[in-house]
Amino acid sequence: MKYSELGFWLKKSAEWVDGYYKRLKNKPVRPALSPGEFKALLPSSPPQSGEPIADIIADFERIVPDAMTHWQHPRFFAYFPANAAPASILAESFVNAMGAQAMLWQTSPAATEMEQVMVDWLRQALGLREGFTGTIHDTATTATFCAVLTMRERALNFKGLTEGTCGAPRLRIYASTQTHSSVDKSVRLSGIGQDNLIKIEVDQNLSMDATLLRCQIEADLAQGYIPAGVILCIGGTSIGASDNIAEIIAVSKEFNLYTHVDAAWAGSAMICPEFRQYWQGVDDADSIIFNAHKWLGAQFDCSVQFLADPTLQINTLGLRPAYLQTLDAEEVTNFNEWTVPLGRRFRALKLWFVMRAEGLDGLQDMIRNHVDWAQKLSYKFAQDSDYKVLTNCPFGLFTFQYCPNGQDTNEATKNLLNAINEDGRTYLTQTLVDEQFVIRVSVGPIACLEDDVMSVYKICKELQN
Ligand SMILES: *Cc1c(COP(=O)(O)O)cnc(C)c1O
C-alpha cells in the first residue's frame, strides 16, 4: 500500500466509524465468544506476498468488531469506563497520521509544549493550586511506579540508583487496604518488596485510619526501618473508598514522607466543584495521578500526573546518554526524563480537542448526570426487597446483592451476574464486600442516557429467578 492511497482508505474508515457508532447500542456489550475461538479465524503464518488493502479491511469488518468488548457502548457499566469522546477519536486519528514520537522536545516540540499547557488546563479544571506541574503517562500504574521509585530514591539520598537496594536499609511504604493492585506491583518492582508495603486498615468511612498509620510509622522507626512514602486513594477501584486526604497528609508530613494520591478514576469528578470536598487537602500532596482516559473521555491512554516538585522524580528517572543530549537541554523539557519509557506518544492533542469541544460545562454536565443516574438506580434496588445495596460512593459507583428468600445470597448474586452477562444488553462486574459477593455498577459511558442506566434494574428483574 502507498501513502498516496491513504486518503481514499481513510474515507472508507471514516464511513465504518460512523456506522459502528450507529449500530453500537443494538449490539451486545460483550461478544459471546469462547477463548481461542477468534484465534482460529486467523492464518497461523504471515502472507509471503502483499494483499490488497480492500481484502484486509473486509476481513477486519467481518471478524474483529464482533469479537470485541465494546467499551463505548452506552450500557457498559463494568469496571470503570474507558471513554473515547468523539473529539478524542478525531484527535487520535491526527496523531496516528503523523506517527510522532515525543521523547524529547526536539523530536516533537508541539507535543511537549501542548502537554505542559494541557496539564495546566487540567490543574485549573480540577481546582488544584498553582505550582503543580506534571506530565502525561500511559497508565496510572506507570505513574504510581514512578512515584514509588521517587519515594525510594528520596529516602536513600539517591544512592539506590547506583548502589542498588541490596545493602540498603529496609524502606516502608504505607497505603490503605482499599488501594489498587498497581501499588503492590510498584512496590514489588521497585525493589522495596511487598513485605514492606504496609496496608493500614480503614475506618468506618473507608479512609485509612490515621491513628493506626502513626502507630505503624513509629513502630517501624523504632525497629530501624526507613518510612519512605504514603499512597493515598480517592475513589478506590473496588467500592470507591476514599482516604481523608488532609488528615493522612498531615501525618505523613510529620514524618517527612512523600505522598502520592491515586485518584485514577474519581479524579475526573473533581472537574465539578461540589466533589472537591472529597479530596480536601490534596494541594499538599507531592504527586497526584488521575486517568483522563477513564471518565473524562481523552481515550486510552492518558494518565495525568501532577507534581509539586518534579525535580525529585526527574532526578530519579532522568538519564542523558550522549545520543540523547541536545544543545538546548537546559532550556527545554524532555518528558522522557519524567517517566519510565524513553519513547512517548503525543497524548496532549486529544485533551486539547476534548476540552475545547466539550468545554468544562459539557464535561461537568456529563459527570453530574452519571452520578445522578447512578443514585437513582441504586435507589431502585434499595427499594426492592429482593435486593440489597451494600455500598454507595459519591462518584456514581455502587454495589448490590440479590437476596431472594430461601436462597443463598452469594450463589443467587453470582447466578444473576452470569445471567446478565450472558444476556449481553449490559455488562457488569463483581467485587467482594466483607467477604460477600456483590455486583458492581459503575456509571460512566459518554453515550449513556438515563434510560440506559435504569435498564439495569429492568434487566435484573427480567433475569432474576
Ligand atoms: C484504574 C485504576 C488504576 C490503574 O489504572 P491503569 O491506568 O490501568 O494503570 C489504579 N488505581 C485506581 C484507583 C484505578 O481506578
Image (cartoon, grey):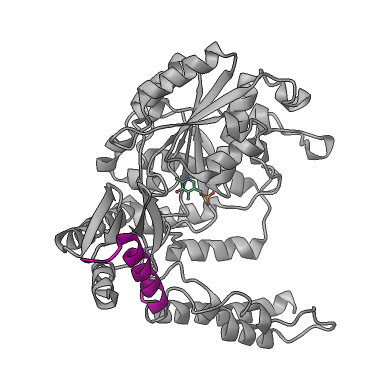
Q: Where residue 447 sits in the image (x, y, percent)?
A: 35, 68
Residue 75 shows in this picture: no
Q: Where residue 252 sits in the image (x, y, percent)?
A: 45, 21
Name the side, left or right, on which 431 lies relative to 102. left
Number of marks in the image?
0
Look at the magenta stretch and give its main secondary structure: helix
View extreme (top): residue:
222
Span of residues in magenta: 405-425
- State the image quarter where residue 206 is shown: top left
- Residue drawn at x 39%, y 20% is 250
Name the side, left or right, on which 465 lies relative to 128. left
Report if residue 417 lies within the magenta region: yes
Name the side, left or right, on which 383 lies relative to 217. left
Specify the quadrant that holds the C terminus: bottom left
Look at the picture and state if 267 lies above or below 212. below
In this view, the residue in front, 339 or 214, is 214
Look at the picture and state if 211 lies above or below 91. above
View extreme (front): residue:
406
Residue 195 shows in this picture: yes
Look at the picture and state if 412 lies above or below 157. below
Look at the picture and state if 162 lies above or below 344. above
